[in-house]
Amino acid sequence: MAETMTAPIPDTAASTDHPAILAQGLTLTLGNTRAEVPILKGIDLAVPAGQTVALLGPSGSGKSSLMAVLSGLERATGGSLEVAGAHFAGPGAPTLSEDQLAAARRGRIGIVLQAFHLLPTMSALENVATPLELAGMDDAFGRARAELEAVGLGHRIDHYPTQLSGGEQQRVAIARALAPRPALIFADEPTGNLDSTTGTDIIRLLFDRRAESGATLFLITHDPALAEKCQRVLELADGRIISDRAGAEPA
Ligand SMILES: Nc1ncnc2c1ncn2[C@@H]1O[C@H](COP(=O)(O)OP(=O)(O)OP(=O)(O)O)[C@@H](O)[C@H]1O
């Protein structure tokens, strides 16, 4: 799929002292002019590169919406936002088409969701290799194979998603998200569809693979114990960050 990027996206991702996430006054309002629903009500957040951050908050507080905006899946309606060097919103930010947003995410941002979102007509190997090919990386299939081996699925590369257990599908999804070596990983309730033993294995895998890459991790969870595995714990309520503190994990 050829994608041209007409709008320049300043790339500051290579600089380690540049924050991975810099949001100021970020808002998201959904709906139409007759019924506008404010979802995010002014988010100020700076996340240094390499930090692990958990986002807690009650159902409906806006966690998934915040992740969607920070990861470039959804456009903010106000404020400014820079993520892994991509200028997504704010004065001077280019207006990006869907393709341009996708291109801006590619290689910078890896996303792991509760529902694994693997392509059912593709094997595990193809699911991991395709984004690498789209990113124009050399040896996409060799890299994908190595990534699947790293998540313990070297023997399953030719299997289709329906032939894999939920835990195995999530391993493929993690391999797919991490294979392009993104500077930033977003994970939204990555164990929500898994039993607790499988979920524990998946979290260990996600944290181990993150530690190897040094990527910034932004993890949405309902589980306070899991949140403590991060260096920083944010709490969202009604579209606002109401608490920002250190987690139990040393920085
Ligand atoms: N397209 C939409 N139009 C209007 N409101 C929406 C839309 N999408 C989400 N919302 C509302 O935005 C609010 C935040 O939703 P969001 O999914 O971000 O919350 P959450 O904290 O992730 O919840 P959960 O923990 O249940 O997943 C909710 O009140 C939700 O109903």
Image (tube, rainbow, N blue to C red):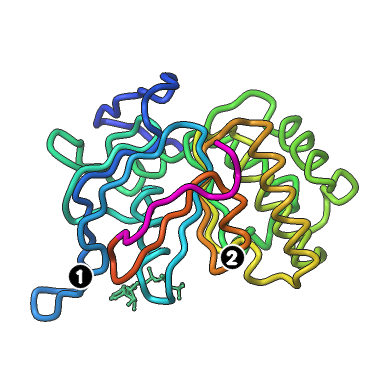
Neighbor class of circle 1 (other Cα within 10 Å; few <14, some 14-19, many 20+) is some
Q: Looking at numbered disc 1 in the image, what kind of residue is underneath it?
A: Pro
According to the picture, the residue beneath numbered tag 2 turns out to be 114
Q: Earlier in the sequence, mark 1 or mark 2?
A: 1
Q: Identify the secondary structure beneath mark 2.
A: loop
Pick the residue in front: 92 or 210: 210
Pick the residue in front: 69 or 210: 210
The residue segment tinted magenta is 241-251
How far across and how far down the image is residue 192, in percent?
62, 70
How far across and how far down the image is residue 111, in percent?
53, 50
* Quadrant of the image occupied by residue 90: top left
Marks 2 and 1: in contact by CB < 8 Å? no
Left or right, residue 251 beside residue 160: left
Pick the residue in front: 75 or 226: 226
Q: Vertical placement of 59 versus 208: above or below? A: below
Q: Residue at x 67, y 63 (%)?
A: 120
Q: CA–CA distance between discs 1 and 2?
A: 24 Å
According to the picture, the residue beneath numbered tag 1 turns out to be 38
How far across and how far down the image is residue 205, in percent?
74, 48
Q: Is residue 103 visible?
A: yes
* Quadrant of the image occupied by residue 13: top left
Q: Vertical placement of 168 versus 34: above or below? A: above
Q: Looking at numbered disc 2 in the image, what kind of residue is underneath it?
A: Gln
Q: Is residue 243 magenta?
A: yes
Q: Residue at x 31, y 38 (%)?
A: 22
Quadrant position of ligand 1? bottom left
Would you say the beta carbon of the disc 2 residue lies within 8 angstroms of ligand 1?
no
Q: Is residue 47 magenta?
A: no
